[in-house]
Image (spheres, coloured by chain):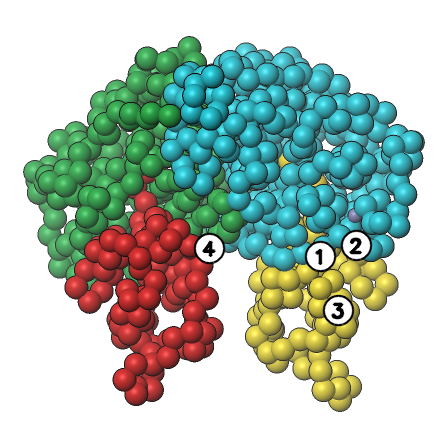
Chain colours: A yellow, B red, C green, D cyan
Amino acid sequence: MQLTLEFGGGLELLCDSVKIHKVSVEPQNGAEMLTMKDLLTWVRTNLIKERPEMFMKGDTVRPGVLVLVNDCDWELSGQLNTTLEDKDVVVFISTLHGG
Amino acid sequence: MQLTLEFGGGLELLCDSVKIHKVSVEPQNGAEMLTMKDLLTWVRTNLIKERPEMFMKGDTVRPGVLVLVNDCDWELSGQLNTTLEDKDVVVFISTLHGG
Amino acid sequence: ESGFGHDLTPEMIYRYSRHLLLPSFGVQGQSNLLKSSVLVVGAGGLGSPALLYLAACGVGRLGIVDNDVVELNNMHRQIIHTEEYIGRPKVKSAAAACRSINSTIKIVEHKEALRASNALEIMSQYDLVVDATDNAPSRYMISDCCVVLGKPLVSGAAVGLEGQLTVYNYNGGPCYRCLFPTPPPSTACQRCSDSGVLGVVPGVIGCLQALEAIKIASAVGEPLSGRMLLFDALSARIRIVKIRGRSLQCEVCSENASFSKEQFQEFDYEKFTQTPLSSSPLKLNL
Amino acid sequence: ESGFGHDLTPEMIYRYSRHLLLPSFGVQGQSNLLKSSVLVVGAGGLGSPALLYLAACGVGRLGIVDNDVVELNNMHRQIIHTEEYIGRPKVKSAAAACRSINSTIKIVEHKEALRASNALEIMSQYDLVVDATDNAPSRYMISDCCVVLGKPLVSGAAVGLEGQLTVYNYNGGPCYRCLFPTPPPSTACQRCSDSGVLGVVPGVIGCLQALEAIKIASAVGEPLSGRMLLFDALSARIRIVKIRGRSLQCEVCSENASFSKEQFQEFDYEKFTQTPLSSSPLKLNL
Ligand SMILES: [Zn+2]
Ligand SMILES: [Zn+2]
């Protein structure tokens, strides 16, 4: 399925400074649905070019990263269990502290 | 079909100062499609409570009003001939001059 | 010469260090800014933050056009002016404020109302124009003049609790007349002086105008051309929408149009919009 | 008494006339503002426009906390400070600027660093707090203190070419720890002083912070609680996203939590975030 992945707040530096990635990702291992857990694994393997520890910790994103599925915090849709649909937009953004 | 109509830039004053209207509008006179031309007539009849000349001129919107269908200028989708789909968002906004 | 491929002085390097650190802006962006010139028309609600940020960031030459004086009822939103300037020209007050935060750039005062008769001469001295005016005839006049001179225009507006922002005449994009070929009825033109405005609303739009001007002047980023930002302060909603491109029928900017400097100078913008270029005083009884 | 059901003086009516004209703001909104008190923590990039607009709009009592001095490399974005204040305390400079645009409100100077030991005493004097700081430990500390004191918090941040904005602890909404229960690795905390920032980016966010503070203080409009604004200056894109509500597991604000004033005062925010509360100077070689 076609997804738009966006990285912000400095996370784009981990993927060649490209903020917007139009990608095609299929469900893994014969599963019917693609979950955010699957997508994180895919992103870690296919998009993150350096310092993966700045993106993930264990099997989820590192502290300080907000994940938004279609402009909505993934905490509201089941976090790692959120299932994705064609044309969804997933944003990974690191919280900023500067001023 | 369900539409979200939004009025801004002062046009909301013509409809009881309500900016966002969730409405249900069906194609007119047995037609299959609802066009923006039909919608303007419907808005003029059902939502505009005062000074209709501040909303329309002839069969279209008055000069200085931008019409956006799903965040896109209706000039790009055929203006009055734009056909609408369920859940579309139509914005009518008057251009501002102040500062 | 510093020997590092740029001509920034040590003081500039220190002053603008946070810009120089930005990989996507850097020395090149700052050098472009320092070589650029920007004209801000109007030192009011929009012009206040736009001028402060343009002065602070290091635009090389910054022009201000305004013919009003500072009034107490401006102070709730026109944060560039201090109480001590009440009764004195806004252009003097704004220029003094800009100089006080950055004495190393050139500030030019145009203490006159912008009119079709002087606009070409004033605007031709700058690379780009920021429209921070408050009325319809000025908006048509400034846009037409930018088309005639081939300058990009950063246009902002704010009334009540709403604001709008776009960039006109940039890189083949639309001009003001492409969007609004016919002026609105003069009764539809709310002004801040008649309708009120929450002071910080032009603050937000004026900052965004400075940003767009900086992006164009530094040649960094994607200016808001062919798109328009719509800001609703009360509900904290912002929409960025796609607008039409240059119109083939535009009477000013289309290839078939032949709107000359002479025609511009003779065009009666007040008659065209049925609105005066300067605003009338307000009476409020509470 | 004017006999019109409000206690605005004729000078206030004139000064704030453009607010009074707004049907959805009006006399009630302005009276609420004049009776309110707002604390801005940090007189830097975010605090500059936030303070100017809060002073201009007529917040009755405006507090400023800052312990830094004005430096030349602040001037590209901290538009509240003038060159003549370089080397002097930011809180003095900012207070003078606020007074010069509105001598009729009370400006309170807190020339000290906000720490867990003094935060309760300072913040308890205000109705709401604007976080305009530049580091992670301050953000946790200010949010926790707001929860302990039951105050809404308008939180903004800007680094590089991006900005973020939301309102915490407002009307049952989430606090900072609901969103970020675990601090990020200290290597992930970019600061403007290390990473650079385009000056006008905190300008936009600081204006929006002033707007949210004004909405809360005047009780007009819908504050940005449970939502977050994400601003990308380079591409001129703004997203307003829905974020989680108050977390049932939050160690500070949930009903089950028992985070007391005493615990707050003893909490080591620098250790928690592995980041110092104050920033170190920058070295830049070009
Ligand atoms: Zn045109
Ligand atoms: Zn919490």
The residue carrying pointer 2 sits among few (fewer than 14), some (14 to 19) or many (20 or more) residues within 10 Å by Cα, namely some
Q: CA distance from mark 4 to mark 3?
A: 28 Å
Which residue does the numbered mark 1 point to in the structure image?
Answer: D244
Same chain for the residues at labels 4 and 3, yes or no?
Answer: no
Disc 2 marks which amino acid?
A: Ser
Q: Which residue type does callout 4 highlight?
A: Arg
Q: Position of residue D137 (x, y in %)?
A: 79, 37
Element assignment for label 1: loop
| Location of residue C73 in the rendering, given as x and y in whole percent from the top left corner | 38, 22
| SS for callout 3 | loop
- Find residue B36 and report its image quarter: bottom left
Which residue: 38% across, 61% down?
Answer: B91
User: Residue A78's mark?
Assistant: 3
Of all chains, the one bearing label 3 is A
Disc 1 sits on a residue from what chain?
D
Q: Look at label 3 and name its amino acid.
A: Gly
Q: Are marks 3 and 2 on the same chain?
A: no
Return the residue at label 4. Answer: C239
Q: Are marks 2 and 1 in contact (CB under 8 Å)?
A: yes
Distance, label 2 to label 1, CA atoms, is: 8 Å
- Quickly name the residue at label 2: D247
